[in-house]
Structures are given as C-alpha cells and as structure tokens.
C-alpha cells in the first residue's frame, strides 16, 4: 500500500442481520465505536446443549428430531436427486444441489459435531484487494504469499494458533481439501500454518480471489466462503462497487453468515465520501449492521506487513472475540441458524426443479405412448376395414377360392398330391403357398409403414421439447434397422399359431382325421383371411366388393365343417393373438425412446422426497429454537464486542 498514513476513520462493531433477526435489530449507535468491550451473556447454541431429561420423549411419544441426523438424511436426498434432462433451470438446480452438499460436508455437519471448535474467519475479496497482506498483518507473520502477479493465492492458507492445529489437521472441516504444510498452487489442498501470535479459538483462512480469472479459484473461493463462521470481506476504494463481490455478499446474507468488511487503500481525501457511499450500498442490501473497517493508503514495512497502529483496532476486535467464548458461540450459532434456515427455501427450489424433471420425463414418455398407441389403432383398424383384402392378397384369395382349390383340398388328400405335381411341372408354387406368402407380405408392409409413422411422430414430438431434443439421435427418426426381419418373424409365428389353433380347435372333427395336415393348412388360410374382415367372416359391403363375394362361399364351407360359432371363435382368437404380437413389436420400438428417459436417471416423486426432508429439517430447527433459554437476553454475536 502506498500513500500517506492516516488513522482509521470509522470502526463499527455490529453484526449482520439474519433471517431470525429483523433488519437493524441489535445494531449499536455509531458513536459507540471504540467503547470498552461489554460482552453480553449469550446462550449456547441449542444443538450444543445437552437435552433435558423431560425433553427426551415428547407427549406424543415421538423422539425429538436430532438436527445433525436430519441434516445427514437431507444430504443423502439432495445428493441422490438428479436433474439430467435439459430444461430451463436444470443447470442452476445442479449447481445449487452441489453447493448445498458441499456446505453440509464442509461446514454444517462438522460444525454441529464440534461446536467448541475454533471460530473460522474466511478472508475473501476481489483480486488485488490485499487479503494476504491483511492476514499476514493480523497474525504478525508472513504466512501467506503476496505479490504483483495475479492470482497470488492459488491454494488456500489456514492460519491458527498452535493449540488449534490438531482440529484443522483432522480434516473434519472442508474434508475435500488435502492438508499440507507447504505452499502450493493446487486448489484441492489446504496449507496449514501455526502462528504463535494468533490467540486460541480463532483461525483465519486466506481464500483465492472471488473474481479470479481461473475458474477453479473462483469455485474454491465460493466453497470456502460457505464454510465460514465469519466472513471478513476485503475490498478497495477502487473496487468496492464491483458486481461479483456484491453477488456473494447477498448470498452470504441469505445464508445468515456473519459478515465484517474491510475497505482497504482509501485515499485520505476520499475517505468520508467513499465510506459514506459504501455504507449506503450496504444499507440498500440489508447489510447496514455489518462491521466496517476502513484502512487508508499506506506503505508496508520490510516484512510486507501493514503498520501496527492501523491494524490494531481490527486485531483487538478479533482478540476480544477470541477471548470471549460466549461471543464466539453466538457468532457460530448465528451463522449456523442462518445456514440451516436458508436450506429450507433452497430445498424447496430443488424440489420444484425435480418436479419439473419428472413432469418432463413423463411428458416425453406420454408423447411416445401416444404415437405408438395410434400405430396400434391403425393396425387394428386395418384388420377390420377390409383394406388388407385388396391387392395381392385378394388376387391369391380369389385364385385359391374361385378355382375350387379350397373346396377340393378340404374334400380329399389327393388335392395335396395334385398340387405338388402341378408345382413340380409348372415351377409355380401351389395356390395355398402363394396366398400364405401374400398374407405375410401384406402384414409385414402394414407393420413397417405403421411403425415408420410412429417413429417419425415420436421424433417430431421430442424435437419440439427441449429435454427431448437433447436425448435424440438421428436413428430414432426411423424404425430399428432389424424391423423388417422382426416383422417377418412375427407374421410367420402368427401363421404357425393359427394353424395350431385350427388343429387344436378341430381335433374332434371328422374332416381333420380325413384330410389331415393339408386340410388344416387350407382351413388356417381361410381363418387368416377371416381376420382381415371386421365381423369374423360375416362380410361388410366393402369386404364383399373387395373380395368379389368369394368370402361368402368360403364361409359356408367352413361353417359346414366347424359350425357358425366355431369359425367366429377361431377368427376372433386369431385376431387377438395377432394384435398381441403386434403390441410386443410396438413396445420394442417404443422402448428405443422410453429407455432414453429411463436411463437419464429421473426418479419418480423426487420433489416429494425433498419436500419431506425439508419439512423434517424445519421441524428440527424449530425444536432447536424453542429449546433456547427463555431467560437469555442481551446482544449476541460481534455486537457484544465493543
């Protein structure tokens, strides 16, 4: 620092408001600065006091919710809830969830386990604000590197008294950072330094720049600030209005973190103006009660430390805070209460995002189901309206019936021998084989065309949805490559099933014994044709026109053999079995889409689980608050130190 040496012009020892404290509550008068410390008796945090024997079991017989256990369960729910679909707000939800899990791991759970651990002051601020110089000056030793190259602080440095080193070496606080005693530039390490000049019960953590050009440094700075019992924010007269610091200050306020500010490098001539403007900005953000320390421009000594007379008020303030266990406890309680309280709306925000994910996955699935349900209806309608009795099937059916082949093959086994002889001489398949092939080809064509339409409709429906578009790949716009083979196999399996159905249903008929398998084949073909008619071989006008009346003649023969009800039953069962096989094929094709949403990892009812965990947390926090000593009065937190 350069410039004339001037005294600090404004020192306030107040505390930031938290959600449980109305704005301005407990703030002392400005002219009280510098007065003799008068710490008020502050109750210990509710979570730190042993439970009264009368409170062990409430009147309802339900055990009291333990705040740490509730937070542990909440952490599990948050960590296991995914937001995989590309939706507005999904990135924010993922970042928020990661931040909450990190705060629970880094601060809330270890702090609740050891409320008597040293108070952690995280020193954060903008690039070049002088954080490291300030930390060195407060502990009166060069413990954190300073320099002109930015960023200077790459890996965080934690400074504590020798008596407190063991607690920070254990790694309960900020467990994701590897402890080291050597300087480094890796953001996943935490350098531990013992400073004899620092009193027990207090530790400083020099964090990377909150606006660093290095992404990892910015992320680490935010993580460390979330693990602070008290955030000492350092800015300069030239940078105090920057947007990034204010965004983090607002976040800290929402979390209820206790905040103190240092306005560094203030030109003497601008001290009053800059301080007044910063105070107005703090008031506008609801931070008017935050202690504000103003350091003028100055020069450092040979060790790179600020003049002791300038840092003495700040060092004395921290020394009194370290010496007063009740004041430290109230700071910890205030930050803990604020952090826990802020979890509830944050969890509700995650629940809404989780609901949006589940709703989007359901909407995508419904669009696929609708497309393939329409495909099923199209197939079923095609089996009922006579359209399959046209073209090649009609020609082969007329040939099979009109030439008398059906009747002859049903009358005697000689028909089979004659057909074999004719086929051998002419090289043409027997009429029944041609008809069976035509039926297979017609059904396969129907299935391929219908499934192609369903795939196109599903693709278009997903493409119109942001989450669906992100899950699409080009091959989903058409049916699977092996669909023709599977469709052919389906039809052949169905045809074999029809023959087996005829054989089993006509087992007690004389004609089966007389004409054996060939008669079964001929009858089976007639039943297959019957499946293409809407009324089980009672033709409609369309069907009569399409088949030239030949279905009527075939029906009379079949009724003479099987009876009227039997042929109806055969056609109905054959149609049902065909549709069952079609349903399986449709499900296989729809699964190409549905597996995308299933494997995305969207759980059923994730929002409900989050809300239930949030309600349980709210109840546990309310119970802890109600367990406070009703007789405790007076100021709490840093405002008790004057």
Image (cartoon, grey):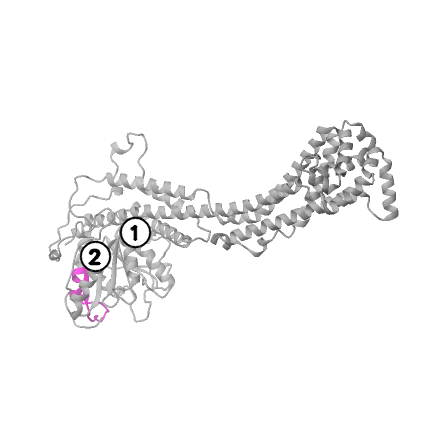
Whether residue 298 appears in magenta in the rendering, the answer is yes
Label 2 environment density (alpha carbons within 10 Å; few <14, some 14–19, many ≥20): some
Q: x, y (%) of residue 404?
A: 83, 38
**Image-quadrant location for residue 393:** top right
* Label 1 CA crowd tier, 10 Å (few <14, some 14–19, many 20+): some
Res. 630 in view: yes
Instruction: Tell which of 487 and 97 is nearer to you.
Output: 487
Q: Residue at x 20, y 63 (%)?
A: 277
Q: Is residue 398 above or below residue 234?
A: above
Mark 1 lies on residue: 167
For the N terminus, the quadrant is: bottom left
User: Viewer-proximal residue, 224 or 391?
Assistant: 391
The answer to whether residue 343 is left or right of residue 600 is left
State the SS at label 1: helix
Under circle 2, the secondary element is helix
Query: Does residue 227 appear to the left or right of 261 in the view shown?
Result: right
Above or below, 599 relative to 501: below
Q: Can the viewer see residue 532? A: no
Residues rendered magenta in the picture: 292-314
Q: Report how far apart the C-alphas of labels 2 and 1 lie in the structure.
A: 37 Å
Q: Position of residue 201 (x, y in %)?
A: 23, 52
Q: Which residue is mark 2?
A: 283
């Amino acid at each position: 620092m350069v410039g004339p040496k001037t005294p600090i012009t404004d020192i306030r020892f107040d505390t930031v408001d938290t959600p449980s404290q109305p704005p301005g509550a407990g703030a002392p008068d400005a002219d009280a600065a510098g007065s003799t410390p008068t710490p008020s008796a502050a109750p210990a945090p509710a979570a730190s006091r042993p439970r009264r024997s009368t409170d062990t079991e409430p009147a309802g017989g339900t055990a009291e919710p333990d705040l740490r256990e509730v937070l542990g369960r909440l952490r599990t729910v948050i960590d296991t809830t995914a937001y995989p679909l590309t939706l507005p707000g999904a990135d924010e939800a993922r970042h928020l969830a990661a931040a909450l899990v990190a705060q629970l791991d880094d601060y809330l759970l270890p702090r609740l386990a050891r409320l008597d651990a040293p108070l952690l002051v995280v020193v954060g601020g903008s690039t070049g604000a002088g954080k490291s110089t300030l930390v060195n000056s407060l502990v009166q030793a060069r413990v954190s590197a300073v320099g002109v190259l930015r960023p200077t602080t790459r890996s965080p440095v934690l400074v504590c008294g020798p008596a407190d080193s063991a607690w920070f070496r254990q790694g309960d606080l900020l467990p994701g950072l590897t402890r080291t005693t050597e300087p480094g530039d890796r953001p996943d390490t935490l350098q531990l330094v013992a400073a004899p000049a620092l009193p027990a019960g207090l530790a400083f953590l020099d964090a990377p720049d909150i606006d660093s050009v290095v992404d990892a440094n910015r992320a680490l700075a935010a993580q460390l600030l979330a693990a602070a019992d008290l955030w000492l924010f350092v800015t300069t007269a030239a940078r105090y209005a920057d947007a990034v610091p204010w965004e983090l200050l607002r976040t800290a306020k929402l979390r209820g973190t206790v905040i103190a500010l240092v306005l560094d490098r203030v030109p003497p001539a601008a001290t009053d103006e800059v301080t007044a403007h910063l105070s107005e900005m703090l008031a506008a953000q609801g931070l008017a009660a935050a202690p504000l320390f103003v350091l003028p421009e100055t020069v450092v000594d040979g060790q790179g430390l600020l003049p002791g007379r300038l840092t003495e008020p700040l060092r004395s303030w921290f020394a009194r805070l370290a010496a007063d266990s009740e004041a430290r406890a109230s700071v910890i309680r205030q930050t803990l209460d604020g952090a826990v309280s802020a979890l509830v709306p944050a969890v509700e925000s995650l629940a809404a995002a989780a609901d949006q994910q589940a709703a989007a996955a359901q909407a995508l699935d419904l669009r696929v189901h609708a497309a393939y349900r329409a495909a099923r209806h199209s197939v079923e309608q095609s089996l009922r309206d006579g359209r399959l009795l046209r073209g090649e099937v009609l020609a082969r059916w007329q040939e099979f019936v009109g030439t008398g082949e059906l009747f002859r093959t049903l009358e005697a086994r000689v028909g089979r021998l004659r057909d074999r002889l004719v086929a051998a001489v002419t090289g043409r398949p027997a009429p029944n084989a041609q008809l069976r092939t035509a039926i297979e080809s017609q059904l396969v064509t129907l299935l391929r065309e219908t499934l192609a339409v369903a795939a196109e409709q599903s693709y278009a429906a997903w493409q119109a949805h942001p989450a669906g578009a992100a899950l699409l790949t080009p091959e989903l716009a058409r049916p699977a490559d092996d669909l023709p083979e599977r469709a052919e196999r389906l039809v052949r399996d169905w045809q074999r099933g029809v023959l087996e159905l005829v054989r089993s249903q006509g087992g007690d008929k004389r004609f089966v014994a007389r004409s054996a398998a060939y008669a079964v084949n001929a009858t089976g073909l007639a039943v297959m044709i019957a499946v293409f008619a809407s009324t089980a071989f009672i033709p409609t006008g369309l069907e009569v026109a399409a088949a030239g009346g030949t279905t009527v003649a075939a029906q009379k023969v079949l009724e003479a053999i099987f009876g009227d009800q039997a042929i109806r039953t055969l056609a109905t069962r054959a149609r049902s079995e065909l549709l069952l096989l079609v349903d399986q094929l449709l499900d296989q094709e729809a699964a190409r889409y549905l597996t995308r949403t299933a494997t995305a990892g969207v759980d059923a009812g994730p929002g409900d689980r989050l809300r239930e965990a949030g309600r349980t947390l709210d109840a546990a926090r309310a119970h802890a608050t109600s367990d406070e000593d009703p007789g405790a009065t007076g100021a709490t937190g840093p405002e008790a130190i004057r």
